Image (cartoon, rainbow, N blue to C red):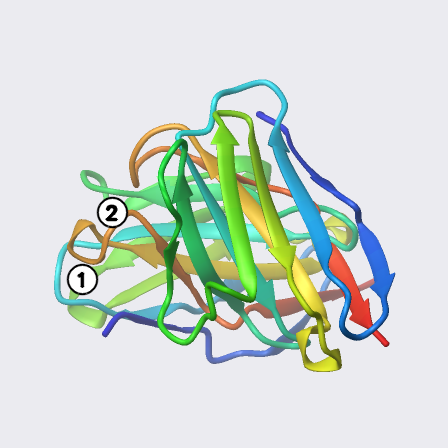
């Protein structure tokens, strides 16, 4: 069965510091990978996605993520965090093998300290 | 980006009553809509997938007679929680997409249901 693991429930970083949020997946087929951000009172917003091609993908708000098939990982990174990045981040995975649906990780809450 | 409107944002109902939640895609036609349930400090759990004009496909363990899903048009899907009980209290989120897995899915703001 498909599964997504975000090992960090909470992460706190200082404003201006770099950020990496981890995501590991368990899939039998070629995955479609996504990162979403959820701010309080708002719907999930897509940051970036990977289907094929270059394994380093760029997203909105200065985020990027790298697909590493050998590690079954799709970690999200940002070189310099802004206070407005404080939110909850979800990694999601889909596969044609499992239908047109996404499986979400448990989420990582990012806190930014000034 | 596209907008998905979910209504109401909060609802409180008495045990035994039914509650309807609407999900509308405002500026695009959604061939597929998804309904999720999110428990505190947990992930989004997919409840069902609905395609316009056809019956919803429910995930294992989700009672289709309790959670009625209707996708009558390309811009509207509804979730009705029938005979609600306190354990149905949760955060319900809809998502809409035009196309397959590679297409972007847009999410509503969610509905906080409290059953008293």
Q: Position of residue B80 (x, y in %)?
A: 63, 54
Q: Position of residue A16 (x, y in %)?
A: 69, 55
Is disc 1 placed on a helix, strand or loop?
helix
Toward the viewer: A38 or B63? B63
Q: Residues within 10 Å of mark 1 (few under 14, many from 20)?
A: few
Image point 19% across, 41% down: which residue? A52
Q: Chain of mark 1?
A: A
Comes first in the chain, label 2 or label 1? 2
Image point 45% across, 70% down: which residue? B62
Q: Residues within 10 Å of mark 2 (few under 14, many from 20)?
A: some
Q: Chain of mark 2?
A: A
Image point 84% across, 65% down: which residue? B13
Residue where numbered disc 1 is placed: A69
Q: Position of residue B15 (x, y in %)?
A: 80, 75
Q: Residue B84's image quarter?
A: bottom right
Q: Position of residue A84 (x, y in %)?
A: 76, 49
Query: Looking at the picture, does residue A14 appear above or below residue B39?
Result: above
Residue A79 shows in the view: no
Toward the viewer: A107 or B39? B39
Task: Specify whether disc 2 shares its chain with disc 1.
Answer: yes
Toward the viewer: A14 or B74? B74
Q: How far separated are the C-alphas under marks 2 and 1?
A: 9 Å
B3 vs A23, left or right, is right
* Circle number at residue B108: none
Is disc 2 placed on a helix, strand or loop?
loop
Query: Looking at the picture, does residue A78 appear above or below residue A74?
Result: above
Disc count in the image?
A: 2
Quarter of the figure that contains the N terminus of chain B: top right
Q: Are marks 2 and 1 in contact (CB under 8 Å)?
A: yes
* Circle number at residue A55: 2
């Amino acid at each position: 069965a498909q599964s997504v693991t975000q090992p960090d429930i909470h992460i706190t970083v200082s404003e201006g510091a770099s950020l990496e949020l981890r995501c590991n997946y368990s899939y039998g087929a070629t995955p479609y990978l996504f990162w979403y951000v959820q701010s309080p009172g708002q719907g999930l917003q897509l940051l970036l996605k990977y289907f094929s091609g270059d394994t380093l993908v760029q997203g909105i708000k200065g985020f990027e993520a790298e697909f590493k098939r050998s590690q079954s990982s799709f970690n999200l990174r940002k070189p310099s965090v802004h206070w407005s990045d404080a939110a909850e981040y979800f990694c999601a995975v889909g596969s044609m093998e499992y239908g047109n649906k996404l499986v979400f990780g448990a989420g990582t809450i990012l806190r930014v300290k000034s | 980006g596209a907008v998905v409107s979910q209504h109401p944002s909060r609802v409180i109902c008495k045990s035994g009553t039914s509650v309807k939640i609407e999900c509308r895609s405002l500026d695009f036609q959604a061939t597929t809509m998804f309904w999720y349930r999110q428990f505190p400090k947990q992930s989004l759990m997919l409840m069902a997938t609905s395609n316009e004009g056809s019956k919803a496909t429910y995930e294992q363990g989700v009672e289709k007679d309790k959670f009625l899903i209707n996708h009558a048009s390309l811009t509207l899907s509804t979730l009705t929680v029938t005979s609600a009980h306190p354990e149905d209290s949760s955060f319900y989120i809809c998502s809409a997409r035009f196309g397959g897995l590679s297409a972007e899915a847009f999410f509503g703001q969610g509905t906080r249901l409290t059953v008293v």
